[in-house]
Structure formats: C-alpha cells, structure tokens
Amino acid sequence: MHNKLLTLLESVRTSFWFIPSTMVLIATVLAKLFLAFDSYHQEPTELSQLLPFLTQIYQASIESIRSILTLIAGSMMTVTSIAFSITVVALSLASSQFGPRLIRHFMADKGTQSVLGVFVSIFIYCVLVLQATKEQQEQAFVPGLSAYFAVFLSFVGVGVLIYFIHHVAQAIQADNVVNDVYCRLLSNVDEWFPDNDSKSQAGDQNSSADVAINTIPIEQQYKHTKTVLAYDDGYIQALDTERLLNIAQHNHVTINVNCLAGDFVAPNATLFDIYYDQQDALQCLDEMRECFMLGSKRTPIQDPEFAIHQLVEIAVRALSPGINDPYTAITVVDKLSAFLCILAQRPFPSSQQVDDDGVLRVITKPFEFSALGEAAFNQIRQYGKDSIAVTVRLVDGLYRISCCCNNAEQIQFVARQAEMIEESTSQIFISTYDLHDITSRLAKVKAKLSQLTTDGE
C-alpha cells in the first residue's frame, strides 16, 4: 500500500491539474465567505457601528462593481491563455533540446502549476461574485468587500505574471535544468541507499545472513519450486518488498525476485520463483503479483537509473550535431561523477531479506555500483569520443571517483572506464598536445587505482 501511494503521489506531482484544482476550490470557498459577509453587512448591525469604515466599502454602485469584476475576470482569462501558451512553448523547447523524457520534470514544477492555479482561481472567484450580484440585483445587493478583494487579487495576478515570465526564463536554461534533475536525484539517495547507523547495522546483519544461507542452496531447502509469470507487460514502477516479506513469512515460503524496479516485463515473463513445501502456499500467488506495480513508463520511486538516464539524455542531445553544446555535456559529467562519489560512500541494501526468526524469505536482484556507473558514463563516453573537452572531463570525473573507491567493484569500474576511454582515444585522430593531455590524466587515474589496490592487499 505504501508503494502504491507513492506511485499515485508521483503521478499527481507531475500533473497540471492537482494544484490548480485545489486553488480553484479555495477560491470558491473564499467567494462564498466574502459574499456571506457582504450579505450580513446589508442589514444594520453592531459590527457596522463598531467598524464604520466598512460602510464606505459599500458606497460604490452595483454597475461599477459589475464592470470591475467583468474586467478582472476577462483579463485573468486572457492571461491564463497566455500562460498556457508560454508553458506549451517551454515544453516544446524542452522536448527538442533536452529530450521528451524531461517533460515530466517541467510538468512537476510547482511554480508553473501554482501560476496557472492563481490565474484560474482569480477568474473563478470573479465569476462567482459577479453571478451573486446578478442573482440579487432586485434587492440591490452590493458585494463591496468581495469586490475589493477581487481588486486585491488582480494586483496579485500582475505580480504572479511577472514572476512567471522570470521563472520560465530561468527554467529553460540548460544549467538550471541539469542542476534541478541532479538535486532530485540526490533527494532520493537517502531512500535508496540509507546512510544511518540503524540501517547500516541492518544491512550488516543481512550480509552476514547471506553468508550463512548461501552455504545451502535454496532449492535444497524446499520440496517444490514454481515459476510465476507476469499477466501483462510494462515497466516495474515499484516493488513492495515489505509486503512480499510478510506474505512469504505467513505462508512459510521463499521468493526469488528476478527483476528490479525500472525493468521492463513482457507478458508471460518470469516475475519470481517461489520455493515451498505445501501446496496451500500457492493460494497467495495473486497477492504476491500485486506487490509488483507495472506501468507504461518508468518512475524515480525505486529506480536510481531513471534520473541518471535523464541526465545522460541531456548530455547525449547536447553532443548531437544539431545542438553541439559540449558545455552542457561537461556539466552533466560533473554532476554524475559527484553522484557516483556520494554513492561510493554509501552501503548498498542487501539482496536477501530474513524474517523475525532469521529465515531467508525474499531474494531480490541487488543494486550494483558498476551498473549505475555504466548507466552514467557509457553513452556519454560513446557519443562524446570526438569531443576532447568531454573526454578530458570524463577522465577527471573518473579520478574523483577513484579517490572515493572503497571496494574492488568500484576500482574495477573506474579501471574499465579508463581502459575504454584510452582505447577510443587511440582510434581517432587528435593533436599530439590533446593526446598527451588525455594520457597524462589517464596515467593519474591508473596511479591512484594502483595505490588503492596495493593498500587493499
């Protein structure tokens, strides 16, 4: 249920309707409240005697109030259409320059959603107040305070329009786009790879359990094995491992999951293998399938490679002949290398989960540093092999990562990437100076890796 809620919240966060709809609802409530106050003030009350300045608000004629409300409502509708047009142009520009998968990044922008909500809600407020004046025109109803509040909202709308123009100009800048995507990637690191004592201790316990359990093959611990297939196709948006663990513990089975969040599953593809002793355990297969949330697209809920691929797509498009913007690609390389440096210091979650009795219940595909690193570097290295500046920055990034390496897998990743860069450089024609620049930096990386290997031994 937790992962389903996260998936729903992610779809709501990247929609243009939720925040504007909420603000329209608030505007409707405000209109009803102000109209109720105006209706109450039409009769002589003690409030009018205590606050005599309120009587001045209702000195305006009903015709002038209707004219003001009509003018504000019409202006807000015009500004709303302009804001929507600017948004569509920004989305088109983002799709062509940064890639269509970056559209969800712009759709998730709270600033744009709030601006559209402000304009629409002011329009709805004026329409509701104007409608109230027409309904009670025979009684000479004067919504004085409601009209003054509408004028105040018109000033707010002007300020929001100025902010929106500035915001859009900032949002479409390449450096800002890269930094925003990178910040969202970092915001999920603590969820994917926790770095606190309790989680680390739990990971150490699971790691020790791996060693004990792996001495006996899981197939030999149960009488039967069944492969469970997927009913439909789609990307795994989230995997509820906690619920899967509870189901496995309750039915005394062990589940071996064959896919990760972000993987594409075809119809009749293997979702997981279940090891069991009693046939009654198979009655919960449908409930186990519900732990796999499939969708038509990938989401960043449990998929670290999703945001990495977004940054890589920006760099690859920047390196295309039509755009030819190596500076954006260099910025992406810097961000990705910084992310891998942070990742090198984090403990990765265990692929084996045990129940309260220490019995292995769920086996998942592990996250691997090398896989995430290859997702970050491979395409940029391939598309940027003809760009000396990008190649140099890739080598510099590898050196920064080598300074943070803590295990053999990380060292092997850096060594393999350095070797492929050296091979690619040898196959293209570049000047002697540029070649020396790259080789000297590669030598620095190799020296650092050699030092780490020696210290490890």
Image: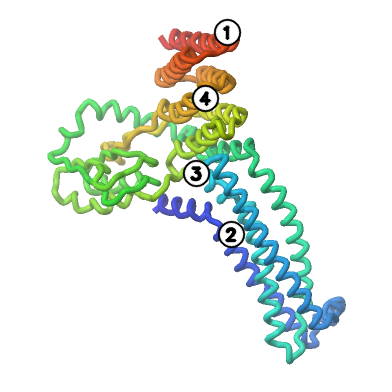
Any mark on residue 285, and which?
Answer: none
Tell me, yes or no, if residue 400 can be seen here.
Answer: no
* Pointer 2 or 3: first along the chain: 2
Which structural element holds mark 3? helix
> What residue is pinned by disc 1?
432
Position of 452 with respect to 175 (left or right) is left
In this view, the residue in front, 286 or 153, is 153
Q: Type of residue at label 4?
A: Gly
Disc 3 versus disc 4: nearer the observer: 4
Q: In which quarter of the image is residue 173?
A: top right
On residue 101, the disc is 3
Instruction: Return the disc, 1 or 2, that comes first in the chain's sequence.
Output: 2
Q: Which mark is residue 19?
A: 2
Q: Which mark is residue 384?
A: 4
- Using the numbered discs, state the Cα–Cα distance from disc 2 to disc 4 in whole angstroms: 40 Å
User: In the shown orientation, is residue 358 left or right of residue 312?
Assistant: left
Q: Which of labels 1 and 2 is toward the front?
A: 1
User: Could you tell me residue 168's position as x and y percent?
Assistant: 67, 48
Q: Point out the tag, 2 or 4, that comes first from the N-terminus.
A: 2
Q: How far apart are marks 1 and 4 (CA)?
A: 19 Å
Look at label 2 and name its amino acid. Ile
Q: Nearer the viewer, mark 2 or mark 3?
A: 3
Q: Earlier in the sequence, mark 1 or mark 3?
A: 3
Label 3 environment density (alpha carbons within 10 Å; few <14, some 14–19, many ≥20):
some
Vertical comparison of 15 with 428: above or below: below
